[in-house]
Image: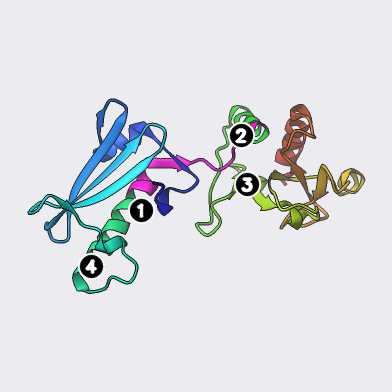
């Protein structure tokens, strides 16, 4: 079962332990009393990221499920539901790391930026967990954005989702590069100063790295 707060995230084992999860054979378990101590909530997470959350009534040993039952109402049900969701959200925020970008090309880019500039992606928008940016430490200006977008928003006749990178570029070079297949005007950026590259292997990694370097330089101004 994949609870909503954990979408696009992966468990950080060190953070799980710090939070108070107990490890047993690669499975991590955390328990807490909720509903003024009347119920026991247990969250179990495997190293692979599978998540299970249960609420047990200690008096009967039976699982309490009304908080997950559509249409169930009442003050007690509402209290259980609120505390259940709050604990899951807290665990997701404190014990999990973003795990959005899956392609080999995107992972290469992330590794390059980390090695070259010490840059880590910043996920700034809770409403858009598939969007993240890099920015320079000195100017705080963005020099790159890694995004997941429907390919149709790039003007492609496709229902697929693409992983893309937005980078700063010299306007004259940008105009010559855009071909509507590999290079596009900057998605959600100033189209005279930003370009978008699909991270699908059509543009060699070394070429993307060079353009990241150029974008980093341009963000110094």
- Secondary structure under the numbered disc 3 in the rendered image: loop
Left or right: 77 as drawn, with respect to 48: left
Indicate the quadrant where residue 144 lies.
top right
- Identify the residue position indicated by label 2 in the image: 110
Mark closer to the chain start, 2 or 4: 4
2 vs 3, front mark: 2
2 vs 1, front mark: 1
Mark closer to the chain start, 2 or 1: 1
Mark closer to the chain start, 1 or 4: 4
- Identify the residue position indicated by label 3 in the image: 139
Residue 57 point in image, percent of width and height: 14, 54
Indicate the quadrant where residue 39 lies.
bottom left
Please state which of residues 103 and 115 is positioned toward the viewer in this rendering: 103
Please state which of residues 101 and 137 is positioned toward the viewer in this rendering: 101
Which residues make up the magenta segment?
A: 91-104
Residue at position x 47%, y 48% in the image: 7
Left or right: 130 as drawn, with respect to 187: left
- Identify the residue position indicated by label 4 in the image: 77
Tag 4: Cα neighbours inside 10 Å, few (<14), some, or many (≥20)? some
Q: Residue furthest bottom?
A: 74
Q: Are marks 1 and 4 in contact (CB under 8 Å)?
A: no
Measure the C-alpha gap from mark 4 to mark 3.
50 Å
2 vs 4, front mark: 4
3 vs 1, front mark: 1
Measure the C-alpha gap from mark 2 to mark 4.
44 Å
- Secondary structure under the numbered disc 1 in the rendered image: helix
Residue 96 in magenta? yes
Residue at position x 31%, y 64% in the image: 69
Residue 57 vs 219, above or below: the answer is below
């Amino acid at each position: 079962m994949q609870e909503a707060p954990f979408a696009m995230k992966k468990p950080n084992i060190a953070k799980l332990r710090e939070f108070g999860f107990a490890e047993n054979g690669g499975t991590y378990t955390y328990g807490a009393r909720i509903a003024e101590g009347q119920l026991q909530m247990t969250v179990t997470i495997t190293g692979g990221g599978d998540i299970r959350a249960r609420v047990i009534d200690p008096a009967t040993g039976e699982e309490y499920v009304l908080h997950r039952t559509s249409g169930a109402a009442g003050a007690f049900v509402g209290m259980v539901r609120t505390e259940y969701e709050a604990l899951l959200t807290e665990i997701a925020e404190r014990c999990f790391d973003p795990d959005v970008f899956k392609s080999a090309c995107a992972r290469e880019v992330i590794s390059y930026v980390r090695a070259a500039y010490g840059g880590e992606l910043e996920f700034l928008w809770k409403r858009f967990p598939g969007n993240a940016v890099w920015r320079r430490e000195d100017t705080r200006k963005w020099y790159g954005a890694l995004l997941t977008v429907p390919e149709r928003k790039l003007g492609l006749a496709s229902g697929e989702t693409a992983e893309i990178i937005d980078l700063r570029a010299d306007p004259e070079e940008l105009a010559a590069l855009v071909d509507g297949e590999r290079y596009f005007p900057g998605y959600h950026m100033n189209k005279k100063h930003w370009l978008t590259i699909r991270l699908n292997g059509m543009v060699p990694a070394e070429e993307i790295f060079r353009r990241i370097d150029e974008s980093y330089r341009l963000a110094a101004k």
